[in-house]
Amino acid sequence: MKIGLFGYGKMGRMIEQIAQDRGHSIVAKIDDPSQEVDYSSMDVAIDFSTPEAAFDNITNCFKSNVPVISGTTGWLDRFEEAIKICEEHKSAFIYASNFSLGVNIFFELNKHLAKMMGELNQYKVSMEEIHHTQKLDAPSGTAITLAEGIIENTSYQDWKLDESGDKTISIKSVREGMVPGTHSIAYKSSVDTIEIKHEAHNREGFALGAVIASEWIQGKTGVFSMKDVLNLS
């Protein structure tokens, strides 16, 4: 498989190593929007670029019939527009806030637990996410996805940083050391606490998931998720 990398920072370099270890080749490394791109050389594009560049990177690939795997955050106000372009050009797309296989299983576990807790009003939910000090955005995209999973399956209506309410999920964001990413969700009552947690030991899991997604999407048309990749029902 021939992969074009859009964004060649730490994640891009890790994806490159894992992809090569799995027998794939990197045919392009695009780290500047002004770079000329040979889309015809790519079987798939993996985008971990910047919010400013992501939309153009992704849609230009669609227009060139190159399927895209994207983990870039901060551009999702144009997500529906990108989906429309993908469908118009009969291309293929997977976006995920986190490509870790374990995290995507955790997403589904979170939804299932939320369904079970939805009618138990004596429990109040809260969330904490911990990341390295270089991560400037808060809360993390993964925490937002987890909060949305709870909102979909309970009477909670929104989430806020360090602020709770009857219908609001409180998210605490901690930035310390070189923590790759830890997310925990707690349902607390006056008598007990139920908690689920995912702790990343390194960032390789994120890169591996993106490469596995790029392998899975070959020959497909449409918009998919990691739930499809992992066949999670």
Image: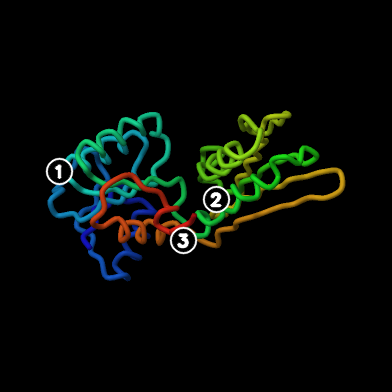
- Judge by depth and name the residue closer to the eye, 224 or 176: 224
Q: Which residue is mark 2?
A: 107
- Residue drawn at x 26%, y 48% is 221
Check whether the beta carbons of the residues at disc 3 and disc 2 lie within 8 A of each other: no
Left or right, 62 with respect to 78, comes to: left
- Residue drawn at x 18%, y 54% is 42
Residue projecting furthest to the right: 191
Query: Callout 3 environment at 10 Å: few (<14), some (14 to 19), or many (20+)?
Result: some
Vertical placement of 169 versus 103: above or below? above
Image quadrant for the N terminus?
Answer: bottom left
On residue 205, the disc is: 3
Vertical placement of 27 versus 88: above or below? below
Q: Which residue is mark 1?
A: 36
Query: Callout 1 environment at 10 Å: few (<14), some (14 to 19), or many (20+)?
Result: few
Amino acid type at circle 2 is Phe
SS at mark 3? Answer: helix
Query: Callout 2 environment at 10 Å: few (<14), some (14 to 19), or many (20+)?
Result: many
Quarter location, residue 80: top left
Amino acid type at circle 1 is Glu
Amino acid type at circle 3 is Gly
Image depth: mark 1 or mark 2 in front: 2
Colour convention: rainbow
Image depth: mark 3 or mark 1 in front: 3
- Judge by depth and name the residue closer to the eye, 222 or 187: 222
Left or right, 163 with respect to 153, comes to: right
x, y percent for residue 192: 83, 50
Left or right, 229 with respect to 175, comes to: left
- Residue drawn at x 37%, y 56% is 210
Vertical placement of 9 versus 118: above or below? below
SS at mark 1? Answer: loop
